[in-house]
Image (cartoon, rainbow, N blue to C red):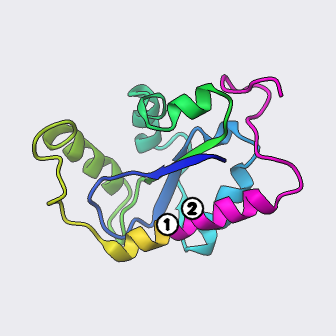
Amino acid sequence: MASSSLCKLPVSNPSERTINALRRARTQRIFWRAAASEGYAITPPDSPIMREAQAQDFFNRSDQASFAHAGVPVANLSFGDRIGAAPAGSGKAALDDYMLHRYHQPSDDLHQPLDFEAGTHSVRVFARMLLAAADAPARAQWKKNSPYQRPH
């Protein structure tokens, strides 16, 4: 796992996490354990926010895509369908608002409200994932049916 990034949407305390494209990697269980250790539930792949991510091809538009296309397993962590104690769908509503009002616009700047505690949990998820991948007996790789799989 060579590259990873946090979704920059300015939300606080997500109670669910998603990880784009990792379902195509053999390291999927590493992410599940890392997210669970920080108290996150995993957003199901058929959830509204995941369907939106697939429809808009967020992963292939991410900073990690060039690594993935070169065959390097990567992680792109984002919040899921539920933010904090809000009802299901609150994550999708935050995504819709961000895409409409800030994405690639002048208002998409560092003046957005950030929850640094939630960010700390996200960084811990990545740290746990990277340590587990580094300690694994075999190197991380994409599943054979993944479009990112390359011969080694």
Q: Nearer the viewer, residue 147 or 138?
A: 138
In the rendered image, residue 64 lying in the magenta stretch gets the answer no
> Would you say residue 32 is visible in this rendering?
no
Furthest residue toward right = 137
* Rendered location of residue 124, percent (x, y): 54, 70
Per the rendered image, the range of residues in magenta is 123-152
Q: Nearer the viewer, residue 139 or 116?
A: 139
Residue where numbered disc 1 is placed? 123
Residue drawn at x 74%, y 63% as measured from the top left: 132
- Mark seen at residue 152: none
Residue where numbered disc 2 is placed? 126
> Is residue 17 left or right of 130 when viewed as pictured?
left
- Cβ–Cβ below 8 Å for labels 2 and 1? yes
Q: Regarding mark 1 in the picture, which secondary structure is present there?
A: helix
* Rendered location of residue 145, percent (x, y): 76, 25
Residue 132, relative to residue 106: is it above or below? Answer: below
Three-letter residue code for mark 2: Phe
Residue drawn at x 81%, y 47% as measured from the top left: 139
> Is residue 136 left or right of 31 when viewed as pictured?
right
Specify the quadrant that holds the C terminus.
top right
Is the residue marked by circle 2 packed among few (<14), some (14-19), or many (20+) residues within 10 Å?
Answer: many
Disc 2/disc 1 C-alpha distance (Å): 5 Å
* Rendered location of residue 69, percent (x, y): 60, 25
Residue drawn at x 36%, y 72% as measured from the top left: 85
Image mark count: 2
